[in-house]
């Protein structure tokens, strides 16, 4: 049985990934700031960089070892560059990038020993193509793409793959708090498929990426975005 650590597992994309992997027989350890009734779970704030180590050690204690890491927890901020405050900047870099980097560095040791591993980073098309008034968010997600490609090279010889899913707009709390009803309607009109992605679509792709069938796929960023990243 394979063991998976999933960050931000209590709602939205992370919750669907946790449910989908559990349905397929994986043992899942989840986390979020809030509480959850899941057995293998830690309430923790990953925007505090030292907490990545705490989470890793708790997950390892509960599961024995970690085969799969899904770096999903993230925050979004829609804000012109000149108004972005330093605290938000530090918090977002810590959560969207630093915690993911640190978790990769911890699990890589175990995965190398086991000669098998899967890492999936949840990026964003904002990191693939840029988003006006979300430069900080976009920068953190682009940084994840660099990490994904570099670690793919570094870990390839150990049967460890690392890939990134870049969602477009997804129906979750994150998009609900970013857009009011009117903005959601306007946004839908510029998406080629005229719809938001459902979290389960991301979860199904993630399930494939962590499977044995996907062993040749590494270092890739896949835009699951209803066509949004293709241009107008
Ligand atoms: N929704 C979209 O349109 C969209 C588009 C592109 C990319 N994404 C990316 O997809 C990922 C998941 O987004 P989502 O839409 O599913 O978001 P969501 O519905 O807001 O869920 C976020 C999850 O992460 C947890 N979380 C948030 N801040 C955390 C922190 N500081 N420490 C630990 N856990 C934390 C949340 O629980 P707590 O609040 O209890 O901590 C929750 O479980 C993010 O990386 C996001 O950037 C989303």
Image: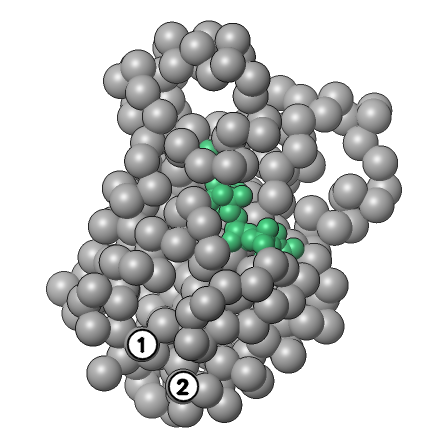
> Please, is residue 144 above or below residue 137 in the view?
below
Q: Is residue 38 left or right of residue 27?
A: right
Disc marking residue 27: 1
Image quarter hosting the C terminus: top left
- Mark 1 is surrounded, within 10 Å at the Cα level, by few (under 14), some (14 to 19) or many (20 or more) other residues, namely many
**Is label 1's Cβ within 8 Å of ligand 1?**
no
Q: Residue at x 50, y 90 (%)?
A: 61
Q: Are marks 2 and 1 in contact (CB under 8 Å)?
A: yes
Residue 124: where, in percent of width, then height? 47, 39
**Is label 2's Cβ within 8 Å of ligand 1?**
no
Q: Residue at x 23, y 83 (%)?
A: 1
Quarter assignment of residue 188: top left
Report the front residue among 48 and 80.
Answer: 48
Q: Which residue is mark 2?
A: 63
View extreme (front): residue: 37
Q: Secondary structure at mark 2?
A: helix
Which of pointers 2 and 1 lies earlier in the amino acid sequence?
A: 1
Report the front residue among 162 and 168.
Answer: 168
Q: Secondary structure at mark 1?
A: strand
Residue 59: where, in percent of width, then height? 49, 81
């Amino acid at each position: 049985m394979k063991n998976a650590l999933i960050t931000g597992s209590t709602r939205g994309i992370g919750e669907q990934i946790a449910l989908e992997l559990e349905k397929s027989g994986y043992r899942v350890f989840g986390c979020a700031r809030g509480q959850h009734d899941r057995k293998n779970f830690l309430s923790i704030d990953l925007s505090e960089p030292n907490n990545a180590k705490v989470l890793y050690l708790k997950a390892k204690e509960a599961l024995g070892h970690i085969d799969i890491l899904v770096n999903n927890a993230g925050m979004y901020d829609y804000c012109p560059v000149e108004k972005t405050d330093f605290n938000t900047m530090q918090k977002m870099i810590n959560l969207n990038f630093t915690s993911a980097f640190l978790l990769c560095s911890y699990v890589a040791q175990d995965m190398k020993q086991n000669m098998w591993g899967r890492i999936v980073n949840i990026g964003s098309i904002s990191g693939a193509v840029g988003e006006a008034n979300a430069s900080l968010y976009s920068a953190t997600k682009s940084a994840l793409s660099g990490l994904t490609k570099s670690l793919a090279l570094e870990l390839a010889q150990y049967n460890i793959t690392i890939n990134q899913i870049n969602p477009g707009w997804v129906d979750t709390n994150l998009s609900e708090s970013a857009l009011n009803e009117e903005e959601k309607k306007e946004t839908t009109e510029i998406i080629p498929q005229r719809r938001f992605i459902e979290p389960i679509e991301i979860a199904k792709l993630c399930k494939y990426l962590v499977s044995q069938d996907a062993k040749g796929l590494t270092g890739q960023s896949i835009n699951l975005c209803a066509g949004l990243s293709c241009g107008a």
